[in-house]
Amino acid sequence: MDARTVEQITDWDSRPFYGGFDALRDLADAEFSGAVKAGGAWLFMLNGRVVGVYDGELADFGDSDGTVFEAPHPSLPLLFSMQKHGGKTQAKYYTNDTPLAEATDTLASKNFTGYVELSENVLSGDYYVVYHSGRSMSVAYVGESEKLLTGDEAFERANDEVGIYEVVAADVDIIDIPEPETPSEPEPTPTPVEETGETADWTQEASEVSQPTPSAGQSANAEPQSASSAPSEGQPTQSSQPARSAQASEPTPSGTTASEAPPSQRPASETEQETEPTPRQPQSSTSESETEDTPVTFSDEQQWRETTTIPSLDPDKSSSTKSRETGVKQRRNTRQPPQRQPKSRGARDGSTRSKELEAELAARAEKIEALQTKLKSTEVERDELRKERNRLQSELESLRAELETVQQNSPGATAERQITPQQALSETNLFVRYGSKGKGTLADAAAGDTDRETVETNLKLEHHTQFDVEGVAVDGQEYETFLHESMEYQFVSWLVVDLLYEILETGHQRGLKDLFDAIQQIDRAELHGNLTAETEEGEEGEVSFDVILRDRMGNPLVVANINDSRDPATGEMLGSLVDASSDVATANNELSAAFQVTKSFFEPAALETTEDATSGGLLTREKRESFVKLSRKRGYHLCLVESRNGEFHLTVPEL
């Protein structure tokens, strides 16, 4: 997790986290918005939904304790999760060309998911608008203290800022919290069926409907086997043999008894009966007509009612239901009368299969309907994308035509030749000149003999180049336009006029005496030039600076290096400047100051380097400000300058 993000999260209200997934489900029920840390893993929640897990897995929260951080605004966990997840920059816009409010309306209408960051070229703070399916929330960190602003206040502040904002598309992963496990219920163990009053009613009803009559070959005193003598469920077949032998055997067509007939001549049901328990119902005649008309008695019906299950509407569950039901049928078939088994089992199997097919058909119909709905939605989306593609193609063609027109009319398009910025600056010198030396000069201003307006009106910076300016363009701009917009030119203009008056108005003439006197003697400025330097070992060489300010005799008075980027000035930059300036000051007594100019800010390491170079020790009696002392009488001022919105501010020494 990013250190700055962790620092911001740890400022939120916090409480201990323990209880694993149960605790996460409690947070979800409370529609919690914030972050949870367990071990090294981080989890973000928005309105009770998990929108991201980083530096670990969801399982890390199931058996670990940690901390719950409640967000002051729901936009924050969503923003941090998107930033950690990573996104794709769609575009960058300048607020003066495309206002933030206009972009927000467009993104909302497009159901955009991601965020807008306004921070580039903005010094007051960082501003964000977070989107999820077109709905937006605003948040901002303002000032050096990074004061948190949210909602309308944050958006209004962002909409009033001037800078460059970035549109970043980012996905959001909604992660489900595991549900608690419930113990599976064991299948009920079949119990033997006992005859009750209900059994007697069913038996009597079955007898009234169809009462089997004894056959001619059956003994007159043979009686049906009573329910009490029937074997219990699961009893092995061998225990039922005495009951079978106690009854008169039914005659076979050849006059032999059924038990004496060979296996090939016995009925199929009787052959199966040798491996099955003895049925509980009275035996009836084996004649074909009586077998077909014999009704289902209570014992079979009761067992069927207890074991039959309804197939699931889910096709995936039908197969398992079928297998369980098949197993139940196999156990149930062992308790049916031999002469009834083939017919009743086939009927029940057919009924169950029919129900399963109906369930599968219903499931397939639902799936087809869902696919048709999805197809219609996809077709609508396809048509919208086609319209969007056509619109973007038309817009692209319009922009291309506009670009060609601009390029044709731009100064650089008609230029005879193009040169690089490095060549343009290194072959340019700036001269400090006056309309009339009797109407007000920098020396007059230092003596208090003229006002600032008179000096600014009388003084001007003229440029001289080592190439013919006519017909030359730099990066598509006219040379003079490029020069006046460069930081080098703007710094020189600020130094020769504004800095002199800032020293006067704040009363730092004595503390910055060497620099104050040198400004009055500046005659010209060399851009991207070199100076002769002398090392501590006495060796001579050359060092380069972005700006070198000289007097009329060409002696270097002030040197400067410029950091023209958004990255802060580092300690290495200051170290290089101090080393080079010290070597130049050793070879040139006239050097009075060295400047490090940045378009961003100074890192703490840069400030520490400056302090180390200018401290002079505990017993120093040096009264000059920010002074690098090389010997008892020699040294120079080390100055740090920040450039903001085209204006320069001296931060070290602080005026």
Image (tube, helix red, strand yellow):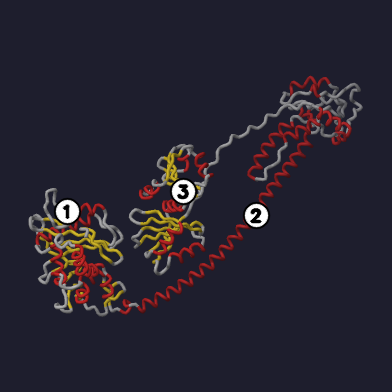
Measuring from the top left, give residue 269's x and y in whole percent. Answer: 79, 31
Q: Read off the residue under disc 1.
A: 613
Q: Is residue 136 above or below residue 393?
A: above
Under mark 1, the amino acid is: Ala
> Is disc 2 surrounded by few (<14), some (14 to 19) or many (20+) residues within 10 Å?
few
- Tell me the kind of residue under disc 3: Gly
Q: Nearer the viewer, residue 101 or 379?
A: 101
**Mark 2 and mark 1: span between their CA atoms?**
79 Å
Quarter of the rendering containing residue 652: bottom left
Residue found at x 37% / y 64%: 163
Q: Is 354 in front, or is 33?
A: 33
Q: CA distance from mark 2 to mark 3?
A: 34 Å
Vertical placement of 294 versus 243: above or below? Answer: below
The residue that label 2 is drawn on is 368
Left or right: residue 105 versus residue 209 is: left
Which of the two residues, 542 or 640, is positioned nearer the viewer here?
Answer: 640
Q: Nearer the viewer, mark 2 or mark 1?
A: 1
Q: Is residue 283 left or right of residue 80?
A: right
Mark 2 / mark 1, whichever is N-terminal: 2
Distance, label 3 to label 1, CA atoms, is 48 Å
Q: Residues within 10 Å of mark 1 (few under 14, many from 20)?
A: some
Q: Which residue lies under the disc numbered 3?
A: 52
Across and down, in percent, residue 536 comes to: 10, 55
Q: Residue at x 40, y 74 (%)?
A: 403
Q: Position of residue 188 (x, y in %)?
A: 67, 31
Residue 261 in the figure: left or right of residue 122: right
Q: Is residue 195 visible?
A: yes
Q: Does dot 3 land on a helix, a strand or a loop?
A: strand
Front position among marks 3 and 1: 1
Q: Residue at x 59, y 60 (%)?
A: 377
Q: Is residue 351 above or below residue 395?
A: above
